[in-house]
Amino acid sequence: MIIDTVALTKGIRAEFNKALVTGPGGRYDNAFTRAPSTAASETYGWIGQVPTLREWIGEKKVKSLEDHSYTITNKDFEGTIGVDRNEIEDDQVGIIKPRIQDLALRAKAFPSRLVSDLVAGGTTYLAYDGSAFFADRTAPNDNLLAGTGATTEALLLADLATARAAMMMFTDDVGEVMEIEGDTIICPPALEVLFARLVTSQKFTGGTTTVAEQNFWSGQIKNLIVDPRLSDENDWYLAALQYPLKPFIYQDRKKPKLIALDKEDSVENFMRKKLLYSVEMRGNAGYGYFQMCVKTVNG
């Protein structure tokens, strides 16, 4: 059976692009700002510059802002699968279709995977101010908080109140209170049930009473991100995702693209009857405002 590689590649590429558009994304898709990139790296000198408004009397007042130089360098990423030519000859596109779709979905979710690494490594990797993203900064901008040490419903509620209050008091580079309201919880699977109740239940039982009370947080916390890559079962995070600049940035240099090496005269096909399909993308993830995310440590 002669394989029409032109039609084959066209059909496979169509399946790939369809999955990119209609398939689900990653768990952190709403947690990062997508920033276009046109170079090998991008410098975000404006991060940290959050001027407030004042009554305009006389000349405009220009405030001195700290000079930040935060650079995200793009990286190349790929994922490649090999298909035996016999599979194509016996079944044409049918046998390869789900694998191509899965390749597309993995590429679509990959920015979220990079953000997951930033969350997990936030006490080590540096933010725009030169400190670790989660760090004991000068008050009131400490976004690495000590929890109550346990993870019962009542104690989680107490820790959440502390985290929300701390975030509201964070200041920008010129000392203005930013009034940030945390609306999203990021947690490991071990805390999913407790936080899901906190987010969705209209009433809860805990604290100093055994009677179900109105759950204030059900309207304040709007999202729950459960990340299986978070290794500590007791630590969790509060993020503010309703603002234009998120706590994380995905720098988009080259969107996912399918590359096919399946022609008859390709080396792999000729020597090993292998048809290769690869997804390539270029970009990287980094940190936005540290004020937009708080880590609570219970270990």
Image (cartoon, rainbow, N blue to C red):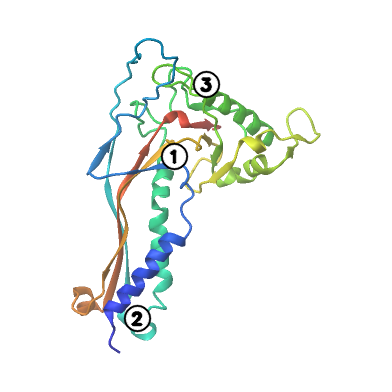
Residue at x-position 41% and y-position 77%: 95
Q: Secondary structure at mark 1?
A: helix
In the image, residue 157 sits, relative to residue 89, either above or below, namely above
Residue type at tag 1: Val
Furthest-bottom residue in this view: 1
- Badge 3 local density, few (<14 within 10 Å), some, or many (20+)? some
Residue type at tag 3: Met
Q: Give left or right: position of 158 versus 282.
A: right
Which numbered disc flags the more N-terminal residue, 1 or 2? 2
Q: Position of residue 268 (x, y in %)?
A: 22, 74
Residue 48, located in which quarter of the rendered image?
Answer: top left
Disc 3/disc 2 C-alpha distance (Å):
61 Å
Q: Are marks 3 and 2 in contact (CB under 8 Å)?
A: no
Disc 1/disc 2 C-alpha distance (Å):
42 Å
Q: Which mark is residue 88?
A: 2
Furthest-top residue in this view: 58
Foreground tag (3 vs 2): 3
In the image, residue 22 sits, relative to residue 60, either above or below, namely below
Q: Secondary structure at mark 3?
A: loop
Which numbered disc flags the more N-terminal residue, 3 or 2? 2
Q: Which residue is mark 3?
A: 169
Which numbered disc flags the more N-terminal residue, 3 or 1? 1
- Badge 1 local density, few (<14 within 10 Å), some, or many (20+)? many
